Amino acid sequence: MRAFINGILFLVIVLAMTFNVAPAQNDFGKDYIEPNDTLAEGVSVDYLGSALWNTPYRMAFDGAFAYVRYGPGILVLNMLNPLEPTLVSRYFYPGFGWVTDMVVYQNYLYVTTEANLLHILDISNPYSISFVRTLYPGILGKGLFISTDDFLPGNNLYVAAFFGGLCVFNLDDPSNPNLVYNITLSGATSVAYSRVWAFTTNSNRMFVYDTRDFSYCDPATCYETAFYFPEQVWDIAISGDYAYLASFSGGLYIVDISSPATPVMIDTLDCGRAEYCYTYGSYLYVAANLDGLYIFDISDPTNATQVLHLDYAGSIRDIEFSGDYAFFTAGAQDFKILDISDPPNAFWAGNFYDNLDMSGNAREVELVGDYAIVGTDRIACGMMVLDISDPTDPFIAATDGYGASMRFVIKDNLVFKVQDNFGLAATDISDILNPIRLPNLPVGESDKDLAIKGDMAYVAANTLGYKVFDISDPNNISEVWNYSDGFGTYYRAWSVAIKGDYVYWGNTIGTWIYDISEPKDPVLVDSIITNCWTMDIVFKDNLGLIAERANGLRAVDVSDPAHPVTIGIYEDELYTDFYELAISGNYCYIADDWYGDFRVLDISDPADIQMMARVDLGASMVRGVAVRQPNIYVASKSGLFIFAVHLPCDIPGDANGDDACDIGDAVYLISYIFTGGPEPDNMDEGDANSDCTINVGDAVFLIGYIFSGGPSPSCGCVE
């Protein structure tokens, strides 16, 4: 082996002395905006690409295009054929928070969120959306409406802001709205407009404003009237002389507003937990949360008649209309199309996510060559294989078709995985583009994690405790040991990891350590009692890192597994819900479930762990993380995201981490590239020619620098 490396090294030296090696230039990576991110000095994070977008919420239509808010950003769809929409572009924007409403005006998209009042995006080119600005962060926008009248100059944007009242923006310059009025109103949830009258909802009241009087009214009392309802109202829609208000506990209220200053309630409709309401033509559409969709004929508002009720499993979040179709966002995956050419006989005509790569909630990710194996918690989606050869454009290449995949381990050409309610199973990926599911073995009601050593799989089986399986024949997996005494519903087995002859099982109150030198007869040797959920465990040499739900990250010396010693505990200023960990070099990469972010921690000093980066994905349930420096792959409920994380360089070119840049680094890189040697602790220090990848060119570059006076190494990517 050494002769092989020496031969390669000789060839590299010859090449280095022959050619003038310069840093390569390419278009690796994309710029993106980083709101709410925490980055240490010398650290940068670049969004590269994403797939499996999920959790549609609000949307806005503009001619042939639909702008749909998903967990991680905005999807733009071409709607020329409403039954076969096509993906135009994605705009990733972390930190949006929960989007509450969206509206289009001219070439701009206005978005209200729970994290910030108003985001403005330039959509003049739907194929390349750009960020313009954010106004009034923290006011919690709840509803949007654009109107034109003769009394306020130009067009106006009305925003119902939960803590900020009714905000009116002038849109003479749509890229820079000017706040002209801010009317005090705590708890505003929605807004509508009719002629010169603005209507807002607040708890169980509807406030009516004459917009002609905004310029000289007292912001606290400038409404014409406050109309009271028996129950809290959530949303409002107006058609002609009537207002329709959705009440989660009171159904649907119909109010005559022909005299806006003296509204009169004329009817109440029973339609379940009414949450959102919309008028289109002579029909009213009411989204009633889990109670489904109600359609009413309102051609005579004094005698509104229910014409259809559609049961729906997901909670409908928004409805938009175009021609004979209504478009719905609902649940975690669904973006459905309803044919309303005949509303009393409306029927589901299509589903967008079948046409895009939006299937499943990503829960786990592992890397195999140019592919990412992604586990999802949707039974119909199963385990997915994504082609990541171009990190800026990942796409689904294959799926094994069925069964939720919580966590998994890749052994040889088999993926062993635990699945909620579907037990332990294996998928053969010897032909990775044609994965084949093997028979599964039921393990427990909700299996959470597994680890493998040799022919044994060690499973954390939730309320059923710890289990060991013989997987020597993956077509005939058998249970050989289990321990559940004292567990029940409290001490749930949640995670498991193996180091040497010891298995570490995590549960709701700590971590249990078993000697598995006799694989079928584990013996308890010690425990780490923390009274906190152990979510994941990883190792680097004799350092164990334990993700604890509320405690943060525990660093443990496991050089003597029978007597583990806590070295330090990393606690964030935020409540932490660290779910999964990955180690690369001197850094730990963390998926945080609660905050919907990923974090990068410097663990070079386990007693004093430091946060290097925190990136808010604007997504919930961030539960999977894998690293191939400098790229990090993050799985969440809202999709799979790929970032390039560039860390500080102490000494550019110091691939082997010995605090010097010399021939040893070239040898180290050649061993890593050609013979599977260890990777650099910091890939950016190994990327000597700054072409954003580690290959033989970096070794050539280093030798040219050392022996022939070539350019000095740089640190990481130069785009």
Image (cartoon, rainbow, N blue to C red):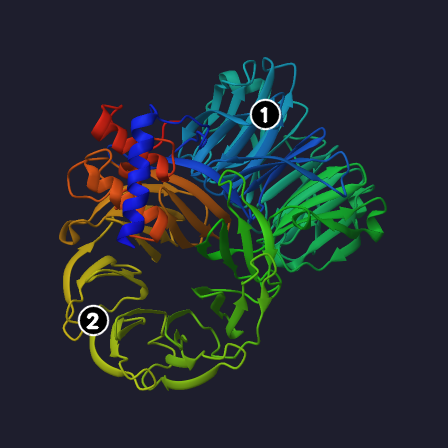
Which one is in front, 715 or 237?
A: 715
Residue 602 position, x and y percent, is: 23, 46
Q: Quadrant of the C terminus?
A: top left
Q: Tell me: residue 78, above or below residue 428.
A: above
Q: What element carries label 2?
A: strand
Nearest the eye: 541 or 505: 541
**Could you tell whether 429 is left or right of 341 in the image?**
left
Q: Name the residue under label 1.
A: 123
Above or below for 546 versus 348: below
Crowding near the residue tagged with mark 2, few <14, some 14–19, many ≥20 C-alpha atoms within 10 Å: some
Image side of residue 160 versus residue 602, left or right: right
Q: Please say if 313 is above or below 154.
A: below
Q: Is residue 255 visible?
A: no
Which residue shows up at 31% across the image and 84% down it? 486
Q: What residue type is labelled 1?
A: Ile
The tag earlier along the polypeptide, 1 or 2, is 1
| Image position of 474 (left or right of 524) | right
| Residue at (43% x, 81% y) in the render | 470
Determine whether the residue tagged by mark 1 lies in a helix, strand or loop.
loop
Residue 469, percent from left and from top: 42, 80
The label on residue 528 is: 2
Q: Which residue is drawn at 47% across and 36% down?
A: 93
Q: Whole-percent x and y of residue 495? A: 35, 68
The crowding category of the residue bearing disc 1, from other C-alpha atoms within 10 Å (few below 14, some 14 to 19, many at least 20), is many
Residue type at the position of mark 2 = Ile
